[in-house]
């Protein structure tokens, strides 16, 4: 049950139905649950709280680089300090990095004509 997202047919304040439903019929709500993990960032122990989906993306990033999630996070921490003097919201930065990784993978798949998995 979806309508095209056509601005000319929608009135302000009217709910809009979309063609691509972000909630698949078998959507796993566990992916949205936050999970705290102890990590080492360049030798310093800390706790990082992210939703399960972001931990899964970090695992993919680590696999793609042949390293561990801790290594990926240490690299991000080191680079943000060297390039930008640090960041106030490291968890937010990690989430953005995960989304950018997925967008880049989707762009590469589009260029190659492969479906994104």
Image (cartoon, helix red, strand yellow):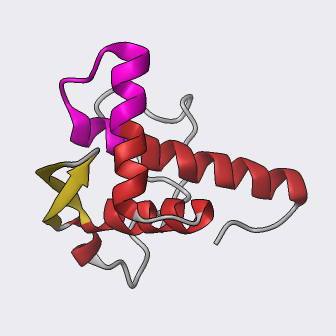
Q: Left or right: where does residue 17 sit relative to residue 85?
A: right
Identify the image quadrant of residue 105: bottom right
Asked if residue 116 lies in the magenta stretch, the reply is: no
x and y, in percent, of residue 33 in the image:
17, 68
Residue 22 seen = no
Region of the chain picked out in magenta, as a range: 77-96
Q: Left or right: where does residue 48 sit relative to residue 92?
A: left
Q: Residue at x 38, y 62 (%)?
A: 69
For the C terminus, the image quarter is bottom right
x and y, in percent, of residue 20 in the image:
54, 60
Question: Which is nearer the eye, 96 or 28?
Answer: 96
Question: Which is nearer the eye, 61 or 22?
Answer: 61
x and y, in percent, of residue 114 in the image:
82, 66
The kind of secondary structure the magenta stretch mainly shows is: helix
Asked if residue 81 lies in the magenta stretch, the reply is: yes
Q: Left or right: where does residue 116 sit relative to residue 52?
A: right
Outermost residue toward the front in this view: 43
Outermost residue toward the bottom in this view: 26
Residue 94 seen = yes
Q: Residue at x 31, y 14 (%)?
A: 85
Q: Residue at x 58, y 66 (%)?
A: 66
Q: Residue at x 44, y 62 (%)?
A: 57
**Height in image: 53 above or below 28?**
above
Identify the image quadrant of residue 5: top right
């Amino acid at each position: 049950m979806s309508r095209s997202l056509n601005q000319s047919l929608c009135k302000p304040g009217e709910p809009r139905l979309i063609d691509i439903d972000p909630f698949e019929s078998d959507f796993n709500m566990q992916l949205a649950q936050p999970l705290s993990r102890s990590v080492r960032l360049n030798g310093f122990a800390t706790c990082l709280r992210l939703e399960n989906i972001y931990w899964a993306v970090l695992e993919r990033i680590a696999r793609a680089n042949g390293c561990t999630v801790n290594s990926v996070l240490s690299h991000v921490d080191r680079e943000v300090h060297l390039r930008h003097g640090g960041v106030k919201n490291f968890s937010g930065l990690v989430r953005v990095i995960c989304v950018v990784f997925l967008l880049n993978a989707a762009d590469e798949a589009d260029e190659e004509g492969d479906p994104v998995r």
